[in-house]
Image (cartoon, rainbow, N blue to C red):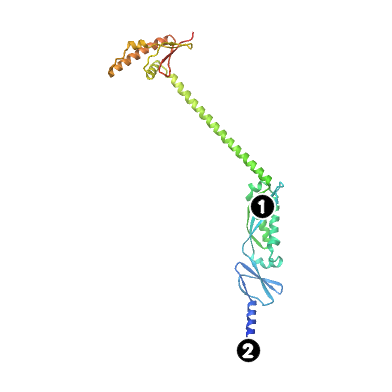
């Protein structure tokens, strides 16, 4: 019986010792600060690691000093009274040396009590200085102004602003329609400008082709001598002697049968004989062209190789 009582006493002592030990030990996790609270009074803070407190009369409140991201959406009004919904992210952290004061003056709900109202008020104040289109064209400047103002406000409260990032803007349906109309108009203007440049290029190319053709015709006109006309006739002649024709346009086609009778072609000729006949035909043609030229007639050729004489006007 005495042994049982002694065992119960020892067990009770051990239990109380364990309870006291547990109530005495506090471990602050990484990235946190422990705020000592002794009988309801804040007695400073301790860093992460192992710490001892006074059992039953002293507690330790853990404060998070890690980076926290606040994802927020705020309705703002621009300088030209346009409503815009802004989506953004604020990265911040609680300063270690300010943990005890923040806990004492604000508590653990500091984000909803202090930080979010500060951010929303800053955004409304800054965006009211810009027109709605400047939120897009001057986005970097808007973000820089907001960041600078938030850094000052956060520091005064014991927090560090790491980054402010604008995710996007959501405009009203009317403004979005107006932006789309402007974009379409700009695309149409660009397309019209490109079409104009293409037309100018094609017109210039056409002028260049016309100038080239005029140069060719001028050169050809300069080369239409009697000798060239004879060579052209021989090159284009189809071997069929033309018959005598006359028309209202004062053009005449001469019967070249005399030339044929003057230089009859044998059934079989040698190369020298063919060359002689060709030279004789050219001499006769030159004589004929001289006579026609003296009478004011102009010699040309049609597409079939026939000689066409253009009679002078009376």
Count of picture labels: 2
Secondary structure of the residue carrying numbered label 2: helix
3 lies above or below 90: below
Residue 62 quadrant: bottom right
Secondary structure of the residue carrying numbered label 1: strand
Q: Are marks 2 and 1 in contact (CB under 8 Å)?
A: no
Q: Provide residue 173's location: percent of width, then percent of height.
A: 68, 46
Left or right: 201 in relation to 219: right
Q: How far apart are marks 2 and 1 (CA)?
A: 74 Å
Q: Provide residue 274's location: percent of width, then percent of height.
A: 30, 17
22 lies above or below 263: below
Residue 193 quadrant: top right
Q: Observer-nearest residue: 263 or 52? A: 263
User: In which quadrant of the rendered image does the N terminus lie?
Assistant: bottom right
- Residue tagged by mark 2? 4
- Residue tagged by mark 1? 86
Q: Provide residue 266's location: percent of width, then percent of height.
A: 29, 15
Q: Provide residue 56's location: percent of width, then percent of height.
A: 68, 77
Which of pointers 2 and 1 lies earlier in the amino acid sequence? 2
Kindly give the residue lying farthest to the front in the view shown.
267
76 lies above or below 205: below
């Amino acid at each position: 019986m005495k042994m049982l009582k002694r065992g119960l006493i020892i067990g009770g002592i051990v239990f109380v010792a364990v309870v006291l030990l547990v109530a005495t030990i506090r471990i602050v996790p990484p990235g946190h600060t422990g705020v000592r609270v002794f009988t309801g009074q804040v007695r400073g803070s301790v860093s992460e690691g192992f710490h001892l407190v006074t059992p039953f009369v002293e507690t330790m409140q853990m404060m998070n000093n890690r980076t926290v991201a606040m994802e927020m959406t705020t309705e703002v009004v621009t300088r030209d009274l346009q409503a815009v919904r802004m989506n953004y992210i604020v990265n911040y952290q609680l300063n270690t040396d300010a943990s005890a004061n923040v806990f004492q003056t604000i508590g653990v709900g500091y984000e909803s009590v202090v930080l979010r109202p500060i951010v929303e008020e800053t955004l409304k104040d800054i965006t009211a200085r810009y027109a709605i289109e400047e939120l897009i064209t001057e986005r970097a400047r808007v973000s820089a102004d907001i960041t600078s103002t938030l850094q000052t406000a956060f520091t005064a409260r014991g927090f560090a602003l790491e980054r402010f990032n604008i995710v996007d803007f959501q405009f009203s349906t009317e403004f979005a329609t107006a932006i789309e109309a402007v974009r379409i108009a700009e695309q149409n203007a660009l397309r019209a400008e490109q079409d104009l440049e293409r037309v100018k290029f094609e017109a210039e190319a056409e002028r260049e082709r016309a100038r080239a053709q005029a140069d060719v015709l001028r050169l050809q006109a300069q080369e239409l001598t009697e000798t060239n006309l004879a060579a052209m006739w021989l090159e284009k002649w189809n071997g069929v002697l033309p018959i005598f024709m006359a028309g209202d346009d004062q053009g005449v086609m001469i019967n070249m049968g005399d030339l044929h009778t003057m230089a009859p072609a044998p059934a079989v000729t040698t190369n020298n004989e063919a060359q002689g006949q060709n030279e004789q035909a050219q001499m006769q043609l030159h004589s004929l062209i001289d006579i026609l030229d003296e009478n004011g007639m102009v010699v040309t050729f049609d597409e079939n190789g026939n000689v066409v004489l253009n009679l002078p006007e009376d």
